[in-house]
Image (cartoon, rainbow, N blue to C red):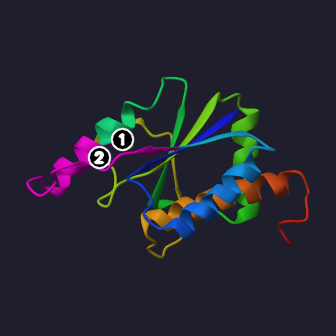
Amino acid sequence: MNIKLLCIGKTDDHNLESLILVYTNRLKHYVNFELEIIPDLKKTKNLSEEQQKEKEGELILNKITPQDQLILLDENGKELSSVKFADYLQKKMNSGIKTLVFVIGGPYGFSEAVYAKAQGKVSLSKMTFSHQMIRLFITEQIYRGFTILRNEPYHHR
């Protein structure tokens, strides 16, 4: 199985970029992991929140193939412990999915078209975090999940 993390907009904090790279490199030992950045929309001043979500949604859906399984990182998604998230990853691998795609949306969330295409939603917390920090958190949790599945000492139970 491949895992792709799709994100809207670049990370402008070099410290976060460095940390994300640490976990991205660690994941290479477990799974084919790809972080793909969809550039921020230009000239959004004249767009409503809904129009911005629609345009971002089109960009997201253009990156998805019919074989991909789309999982949204969404505040209304299912909250999982790290161990349950590891089990979630294992079930996805066992199901024969070619590519599992996690998506971090733009500042206003996802369009209805993206929600309609998604096969699941996961929430990392009830708290609100910047989109840049969520990239680090989900990358670390995917790495943690694989270490749990292999009974490696990274995660303490």
Q: Is residue 102 left or right of residue 107?
A: right
Look at the image and tell me in which quarter the N terminus lies: top right
Left or right? Give the position of 22 relative to 41: right
Considering every residue shown, the one lying at the far bottom of the view is 127
Residue in the picture at 75% in, 44% down: 28
Question: At numbered mark 2, what does the secondary structure look like: helix, strand or loop?
Answer: loop
105 or 75: nearer the viewer: 105
Residue 94 located within the stretch drawn in magenta: no
What residue lies at 89% left-to-right and 51% top-to-bottom?
150
Q: CA distance from mark 2 to mark 1?
A: 5 Å
Quarter of the figure with residue 44: bottom left
Write down the residue under mark 2.
Answer: 111
> Visible in this render: residue 132?
yes
Q: Is 44 situated above or below 57?
A: below
Percent x, y of residue 93: 73, 36
Q: Which mark is residue 122?
A: none
- Give the x, y percent position of residue 16: 55, 67
Name which residue type carries label 1: Val
Q: Is residue 41 magenta?
A: yes
Q: Residue at x 32, y 61 (%)?
A: 107
Q: Specify the farthest residue to the left.
A: 46
Look at the image and tell me whether residue 79 can be seen: no
Residue interval drawn in magenta:
36-56
Residue of label 1: 114
In the rendered structure, which amino acid carries the disc numbered 2? Ser
Q: Position of residue 156 (x, y in %)?
A: 86, 72
CB contact under 8 Å: marks 2 and 1: yes
Residue 128 image-quadrant placement: bottom left
